[in-house]
Amino acid sequence: MSSITFPYSGPGHSPSPSSSSINESSHFPSSYSASADTDSFQMNPLSSHPPRTPRTSIISSSHVYTTEVYSSNGDAQERPNTYEEDTEDEDDTTARNPAQHRVRKEEIWRELLKTSNGRDKTFKLMQYSLRMYLLFHTTIMASPGLRHKGRRPWEAELMKRLQSAIAGFSLTRKCLILFNWLPPLTAILAEHSSVPFSTGSQKQKPKPLLHTFLHASPPVLLEFVNGLADDAYTFSRLGLVGTRAGEQAGRLADWCWFASTLVNLVENSVERNVILDLQHQVESRLYTESMTGATSKSNPAANKIDEKELARLQRQDYWIQITRIKLLMDLVYVSYNVFNVRRARGQVQTFTGLASAALSTAKLFDRHKTSLLKGVHS
């Protein structure tokens, strides 16, 4: 591609080869080529930088370049006009943006409060918010400048009402999670009642139920025991079980909570390592495609799929980190109960309880928001 030959434009015109080569090198990029028998330029399909908005004259007088993209089943498909497809994707994205504004926060809270888990997290947030207020109020009133003044009658009545509300929220939350041992029990019984494998003409006898419980998954077994102990402690607070038995059940529940939190932290770390590995693979693929000359205009399908996958993995990693912080807050909180730590117990448990409630509520809020957005899009 050493020169560009222009058609005969009139009598007395004789193009100079040297001037045409200079014009090509100084004014025309390498992504265009010219044919000797045509009066237009042709786009080079191997160019790494095709024009962003091809002109109508170029498209009408030359062949539109095509790129190969791969579908999910691995077959190569031909895409005739990438520019029109990009325009359609932008219109689709623009059309989806108003749908996000149609999902109001009130609708998300309505869906969240329909579930017992959502009400539990909401009441926990209110409970520890009141505890934090009481903590700050007590700290301020205990300062040297205000210690001698004492509390006014309405302040004492307000403190009493707030303490009663905190106890009421705590008992309400305990009642909301009653019979939380049914899901792990269902999983254990489903494993026990599975059809035994047969060897030849003889069928293996089913194993005893106790054997199934003892060989169940440790997280499932911990959740089952924790649910039973929590129910016994709740019945003790309701007056259906003795106080001593309720205290022992509550201590057993704390130990189960402590152990399950450690297990969940290990699972969270493993899951995050997997997500980071997948994210590194996608980033490496995007970097390789960019270095080999593939752009969003020359091969939009592969790039868009990788970009969406990378955004999904980054979002998933974000919420995994949020879950990890929440589990650490729970671990600090329950450690004070398990090891019977007294120093700064009220302050630390109030702060960690409020942080855990805020993080878990935010995660649940985002989950219901995503579900509503999917319903709007569908």
Image: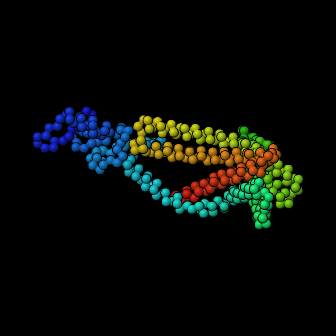
The image position of residue 216, as x and y in percent, is 75, 43
Report x, y in % for residue 256. 78, 46
User: Total label count?
Assistant: 0
State which quarter of the image contains the N terminus.
Answer: top left
Foreground of the two, 70 or 170: 170
At x 52%, y 40%, the residue is: 282
| Residue at image point 22% right, 43% down | 39
Identify the residue at image location x=68%, y=58%: 122
The residue nearer to you, when weighing 264 against 20, is: 20
Determine the residue located farthest toward the left in the rendered image: 12
Is residue 192 something that shows in the picture? Answer: no
Residue at image position (69%, 40%) is 266
Give the residue furthest to the bottom.
154
Residue 153 % position (x, y): 79, 66
Tell me which colouring the rendered structure shows: rainbow
Query: Does residue 46 sit above or below 116 in this rendering?
Result: above
Residue 306 horizontal side relative to residue 9, left or right = right
Q: Is residue 248 visible?
A: yes
- In this picture, residue 238 sits left or right of residue 34: right
- Can you give x and y, in whole percent of width and height, for residue 227 in the image? 77, 52
> Which of the pair 257/302 is nearer the observer?
257
Q: Which image quadrant is residue 314 in?
A: top right
